[in-house]
Amino acid sequence: MRAILASWTLVALMCCLGSTANAESGQTAATESLLARLPSANLRETATLVGELEQSGGDRMLPLFQIMLDGRLYSRKSDDALVAVTQPPTGDWVLTDVFTGASLGTATRREVSKVRVNNRLRVQLREAIARIQLNAEDAGARLAAVDTLFGDLNDSSAALLSERRDLETDDKVKGAIEEALALYRLRSSSEPAVQVAALNVLAESLNTEVRYAVEQLAAADSAAALPVRNAARKALTRIDSNLEFYGFLEQLFFGLSLGSVLLLAAIGLAITFGVMGVINMAHGEMIMLGAYTTYVIQLLMPDHIGLSLWIAIPAAFLVSGLVGVIIERGVIRFLKGRPLETLLATFGISLILQQAVRTIFSPLNRQVASPEWMSGSLEINAALSITYNRLYILLFALLVFALLQLILKKTSLGLNVRAVSQNRDMAKAMGIRTEWVDAMTFGLGSGVAGVAGVALSQLTNVGPNLGQSYIIDSFMVVVFGGVGNLLGTLVGGFTLGVANKFLEPMTGAVLANILILVFIILFIQKRPKGLFPQKGRAAND
Amino acid sequence: MTESRSMLRLSGREGTLFIGVLFAVTVLASLANLVIPEDSFLHVSTYTITLLGKYLCYALLALSVDVIWGYCGILSLGHGAFFALGGYGMGMYLMRQIGDRGVYGNPELPDFMVFLNWQELPWYWYGFDNFGFAMLMALLVPGVLAFVFGWLAFRSRVTGVYLSIMTQALTYALMLAFFRNEMGFGGNNGLTDFKDLLGFDLQADGTRVALFMATALCLGGAFLASRYIMGSRLGRVILSIRDGESRARFLGYRTELFKVWLFVYSALLAAVAGILYVPQVGIINPGEFSPLNSIEVVVWVAVGGRGTLYGAVIGALLVNYAKTRFTAILPEGWLFALGALFVYVTLLLPHGIAGWFTRRFASKSVKEAAA
């Protein structure tokens, strides 16, 4: 009870006094006097003051420096108190306390005067902030601080960094500090031995600034001593080969990411085509329906983007699966044994679905928001970063694949599906309701396409033509991988995805696409049944 | 087998009727445009003549699809590619005919090349200022493409839906390629702004009527040639391949050769259609390669009734007339209607309009015979 009372008193005190002076923000007297001189100082004096403030105030000065850097530091004319100013688009300026952030009411433009900052001061402030942050708790903040200082160290900041290096426990930060120091030694020292040693450290760096510095030393016309130049050349080759390696990894990742998209788009098709021998030209529209389901669910719950995505997955499965079952029962069932007619009829359905979406949602593309955990990227090092959305979709595709395999291998539905796909007549003779299996298979394949649509909505815009752009590619994957074989689809999808991304830098995106198509056309000549053909008598019709 | 033979005989009688109607309409429409004065009620406007010419080009394209789909069971979803290649051949000739009358006034280079800062004509544009050479190439390129593709596909016995998907991929790949500016075919915009053909102004009524008549002539010729082929022993073999390819092979026929040559013949018909199409419409662009266009042709044939030749023509005319009307009145509804047409025809009208008619007449005559 007493504690609560005491804290209330404290809050009340701060409210009364906080508006008049900074004395209660817990600054020492020395800092306080420095702060008091800030409003009336000229630019040169400000620079000195900032240095002294850093000395005496330490990390408590961080908000002050940040506000100053942002150009939001003002002094109130009535009492010379320092305030942080936010300028709303209209009305009076809002004043807050620099250190506590407490509100200090509003003021007009005339009642405050700005603490002026020039570019030199900004550099100084940035460095001061970096120095303070070097001692921050969070390793990420420390790394950011090193990055800020990286290219332009001076004697004092270099000394600071080497001090920090000995204390540093995080490997990543330590490595960055080593690099920064090595670059500093390389630039400041004129002794070949020091420079060569620095170059040996820098050879493992992926920083563009380091590469530039090394490249200049290695250049034929550089003024550096011969051993330094040779070491620089060696370091440059090393850096370049490292960069190339990470570039390769990045391309591989892009390829796998494209492959995962192709896999998601094609896997439903592989099921329907493999089991029923039916070409479903409306398959792309099932993907589109899934994407639009995501969009609608997001409209319904705009405040829970992340949750809406989780709800969208089963919802899209149901919507697309239901439409699939309706198509199977309403049209495809009557076209048994006439695959070409089925192809035409389902194409007609795809046109109808596209136009329906265009009429309902407008022909324009719709943006589906990504939840926070899907945006941003995982930075492995300076040369390689992986965007989260692609990473998650890759994992998601593999998960869907594993689930489908499980359904096909371990459930009674899967058993029936496999039986029908291997020999329809025999399965019928054994008492399997092939009609029912067909409907369920088609529903499953379409539902999976819908789930693919949810994933795709995170990568591209959602529009009526979304499905069309994937249909030919997914056919290629299925045909390439071999019909009636999910593993073939997996291998086919990733192969085509990776091949496409590795061709792209050489030929450009469009030509890469064309080359892949031509390759598959030729491949089919050699192996008409795909990579993994179905074995046994069922395959010979 | 008996059914197909009876259908063949029927198509003989109705085919003659078809040729007669085509001839009559062509002559009457041309006369009505050229001779009858403009304010007369019976005058046919040049716009209508061009529209008719366009429809007849589509009809020829549909005929080419019917030849392989209706008679040989090869469903090509990429015939638009041959059509567009023929069209591009004609377009290149027309482009060279513009000469220095283009926007940039360059006597050698077409406008889009000047725009792209190209200094000289790419090698594959050489010779296209010569009409004969251009026409030869407009037929040769699609023909060779069809031969290579068909030879590769039929030799390794790619059939059914696989083949359909492959043809679709073919036209899709070509579309992507022609969309590229670097290809030297005008990229996105294609070839357009044509001025004259063999020295005749393309905008003149006389040229339009002549093009229309030429199209009608080609369609009639293609119809007669196809009917002759299908009625011959060669046609019988082709029909037998459609109905049972393995059996035909076991009887000693090299089915893949028959298929390849029929495929090339069909591609050439499509190319002719493209050649005639471009000067009448006045533009050729990569959109013609789009898979949707090719698959629409298949629907024309399905609506008209495949395996009858004249059915394909009827289907092409009817669907395109419907499209013209529909897109004018209710542009949103066209894709609904087209989609529904796909489903309706495959489900309920498997033999198309022609099949429906012959059935009715056949059953009537059977009844009469019974009575």
Image: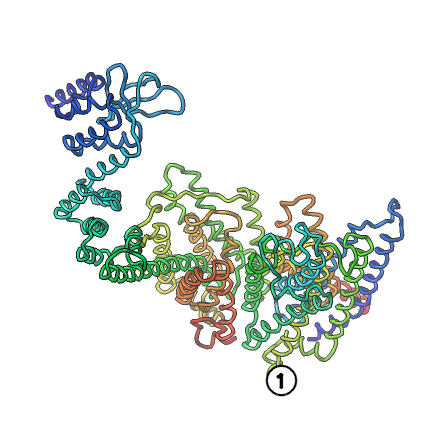
Mark 1 neighbour density, 10 Å: few (under 14) some (14–19) many (20 or more): few
Give the total of numbered labels: 1
The answer to which of A82 and A384 lies nearer the viewer is A82
Q: Classify residue B6 as left or right of residue A272.
A: right
Please indicate whether residue A52 sits to the left or right of residue B288 in the image: left
Q: Nearer the viewer, residue B235 or A498?
A: A498
Q: Residue B135 appears at what percent x and percent y? A: 71, 67
User: Residue A418 falls in which quadrant of the image?
Assistant: bottom left
Residue at the image position 60 percent from the left and 63 percent from the top: B122
Q: Which residue is mark 1?
A: B251
Name the residue nearer the viewer: A211 or B339. A211
Instruction: Residue B38: give x, y in percent of width and height.
Output: 86, 46
> Where residue A278 sits: x, y (%)?
52, 64
Chain label for disc 1: B
Residue furthest to the left? A2
Location of residue A247 in the rendering, given as x and y in whole percent from the top left corner: 34, 58
User: Quadrant of the rendered structure where residue A78 is?
Assistant: top left
Residue, far top: A78
Quadrant of the image containing the N terminus of chain B: bottom right
Judged from this view, the residue extending furthest toward the bottom is: B252
Q: Is residue A79 left or right of residue B94?
A: left
The amino acid pointed to by label 1 is: Leu
Is residue A359 in sight in this rendering?
yes
Mark 1 residue element:
loop
Which colour assignment does the render follow? rainbow
Residue B298 is left or right of residue A470, and the answer is: right
Where, quadrant-wise, is the C terminus of chain B in this rendering?
bottom right
Residue A197, relative to residue B247: is it above or below?
Answer: above
Q: Is residue B339 visible?
A: no
